[in-house]
Amino acid sequence: SAAGLELDRGVAFLLVPVFLACGVIVYFSLAVEPDFAQPIAVVVLTALCAAVTRSRRKTHLCFMAALLCALGVLAAKVETWRAGTK
């Protein structure tokens, strides 16, 4: 299919900043600021799921998208902490 051909060409790499930005948007739309442990736990969990599902391509891509979103949340948390804002 056309989607499979595009994935074989590496087009999914172009979506990395999109999913990171989605994570940042999620972080700044939260009503309560999470501790560091929560985003780190989500990153570890999604990374583990992505590693386990590596043989199933579509499932792996979904977990990689979730991992990138979680990394976006973590990046926003680190930047908020670094800047000293709440």
Image (spheres, rainbow, N blue to C red):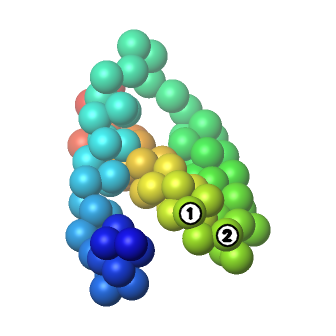
| Residue 74 appears in the rendering | no
Which residue is pictured at 42% across the width and 48% down the height?
Answer: 69
Q: Please name the amino acid that badge 2 sits on.
A: Arg
Q: Position of residue 75 (x, y in %)?
A: 37, 51
Q: Please name the amino acid that badge 1 sits on.
A: Lys
Position of residue 37 in the picture relative to residue 32 (left or right): right
Q: Position of residue 9 (x, y in %)?
A: 31, 86
Position of residue 77 in the picture relative to residue 59 (left or right): left
Q: Quadrant of residue 1?
A: bottom left
Q: Position of residue 26 (x, y in %)?
A: 36, 32
| Mark 1: few/some/many CA within 10 Å (<14, 14-19, 20+) | few
Q: Which residue is mark 2?
A: 56
Which residue is pictured at 55% across the width and 32% down the height?
Answer: 35
Residue nearer the viewer, 5 or 16: 5
What label does residue 58 carry, if any? 1
Is residue 5 positioned above or below 86 on the image? below
What label does residue 2 carry, if any? none
Disc 1 to disc 2: CB gap under 8 Å: yes
Which residue is pictured at 31% across the width and 42% down the height?
Answer: 22
Residue nearer the viewer, 6 or 71: 6
Q: Position of residue 45 (x, y in %)?
A: 69, 52
Separation of disc 1 and disc 2 at Cα?
Answer: 6 Å
| Mark 2: few/some/many CA within 10 Å (<14, 14-19, 20+) | few
- Helix, strand or loop at label 2? It is loop
Quarter of the image where the C terminus is located: top left
Q: Quadrant of residue 54?
A: bottom right
Q: Quadrant of residue 52?
A: bottom right
| Residue 5 appears in the rendering | yes
Q: Residue furthest top?
A: 31
Position of residue 36 in the picture relative to residue 82 (left or right): right
